[in-house]
Each structure stands twice: as structure tokens, then as C-alpha cells.
Image (spheres, helix red, strand yellow):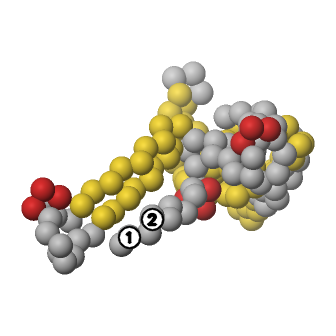
């Protein structure tokens, strides 16, 4: 049996994306399995995949059954944030006569979230590759008074939630 929990960063900035991976590995069938996952208090959470069951082959250890989770965590407050422990219990079945109960628990490390920079003011976007684009429903060279058209403004930012993006207010039109 093997249980592993990893984080892509242990000291992110407020709102910065942290990738959390949980992998449970076992060789034999399990009966009465229970898995207790953390609730990730202090984070906005986006699940990438949950309970993805696969078989992983390794040259030195043969085939392993694997259960994996991946979450994108976005800290909602600065300071240390503890992540609840993860528990895995059940009965391993090697054969009809070879069975054994097991209980594994892992306590993920706390994450020390840095505050937004002072110069950020009331608004902060910890994103990479931010772009702002506009498009028009008609060619502006052929625009005449009274023509109806649609202007579309698109804000794109990597590694943030849509709720972190600002609302774009159009300028007053005449």
C-alpha cells in the first residue's frame, strides 16, 4: 500500500493556483474501502479529476492499482492554512484465505499563503499571460451613423478562476 499527497507550491501568494494531487496505490483487491478526503477550508477548489482508477505498470514492482485525485486550490486568505488529514481504510484481499485489515493516514503539510502585494490595493489578480482583446461584428471601415453592431471584449488569464477576473465596464456611448 502506498499513499502520497503533493502540492505544487507550499508558499503561494493569495489567490495563486496550487495543484494538489492525491494518489493511493495497492496491489490487491480491497473490500469495505473508505477514503476520507479533506474539505480544503480556506480555499476555492476546482476538481480536475476524482477517483480516477487506473493500473500502473512498473518494471521493478509489477502492476499496481491506482486511485488518483487532482484539485486546483486557490487560497482565499493569507497566513498558514492547514489541510485536513487523509485516511484510507479497508480489507486487503490477496486470496480467499489471505486477508488483512489496513488503515493508512497522511497529514498534508500546511500551506503558508503570502498576502497580496501592498501596491495591489483592493484588487489583485495573480495570473500569467493576461490578454484583453476586442472584436467587432462588422468592419469598422464601413460603419455608418445608425448602424447596429456588437463589440465583444474578451479578458483571458491563465491559472485563475473566472470569479477572480474583474468585471469589464464599457465606456458610455453617445
Q: Quadrant of residue 32?
A: bottom right
Q: Quadrant of residue 19?
A: top right
Quadrant location of the C terminus in the rendered image: bottom left
Q: Nearer the viewer, residue 39 or 107?
A: 39
Q: Position of residue 12 (x, y in %)?
A: 74, 36
Tell me if residue 164 can be seen.
yes
Q: Residues within 10 Å of mark 1 (few under 14, many from 20)?
A: few
Q: Residues within 10 Å of mark 2 (few under 14, many from 20)?
A: few
Residue drawn at x 51%, y 23% as measured from the top left: 59
The residue to which callout 1 is attached is 173
Tag 2–tag 1 contact (CB < 8 Å): yes
Tell me if residue 24 can be seen.
no
Q: Position of residue 36 (x, y in %)?
A: 79, 59
Check disc 2 and report its element: helix, strand or loop: loop
Label 2 and label 1: CA atoms lie apart by 8 Å
The residue to which callout 2 is attached is 170
Residue drawn at x 68%, y 47% as measured from the top left: 124
Q: Quadrant of residue 31?
A: bottom right
Residue 153's tag is none
Residue drawn at x 30%, y 64% as measured from the top left: 151
- The residue sitting at the top extreme is 60
Residue drawn at x 63%, y 46% as measured from the top left: 125
Nearer the observer: mark 2 or 1; the answer is 1
Q: Position of residue 134 (x, y in %)?
A: 33, 54
Quadrant location of the N terminus in the rendered image: top right
Amino acid at each position: 500500500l502506498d499513499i502520497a499527497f503533493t502540492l505544487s507550491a507550499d508558499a503561494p501568494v493569495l489567490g495563486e493556483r496550487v495543484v494538489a494531487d492525491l494518489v493511493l496505490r495497492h496491489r490487491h483487491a480491497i473490500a469495505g474501502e473508505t477514503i476520507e478526503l479533506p474539505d480544503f477550508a480556506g480555499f476555492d477548489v476546482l476538481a480536475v479529476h476524482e477517483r480516477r482508477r487506473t493500473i500502473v505498470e512498473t518494471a521493478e514492482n509489477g502492476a499496481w492499482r491506482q486511485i488518483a485525485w487532482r484539485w486546483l486550490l486557490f487560497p482565499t486568505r493569507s497566513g498558514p492554512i492547514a489541510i485536513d488529514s487523509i485516511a484510507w481504510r479497508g480489507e486487503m484481499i490477496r486470496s480467499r484465505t489471505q486477508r488483512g485489515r489496513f488503515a493508512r493516514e497522511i497529514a498534508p503539510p500546511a500551506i503558508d499563503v503570502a498576502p497580496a502585494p501592498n501596491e495591489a490595493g483592493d484588487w489583485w489578480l495573480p495570473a500569467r499571460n493576461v490578454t484583453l482583446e476586442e472584436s467587432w461584428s462588422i468592419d469598422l471601415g464601413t460603419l455608418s451613423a445608425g448602424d447596429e453592431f456588437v463589440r465583444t471584449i474578451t479578458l483571458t488569464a491563465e491559472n485563475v478562476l473566472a470569479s477572480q477576473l474583474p468585471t469589464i465596464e464599457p465606456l458610455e456611448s453617445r
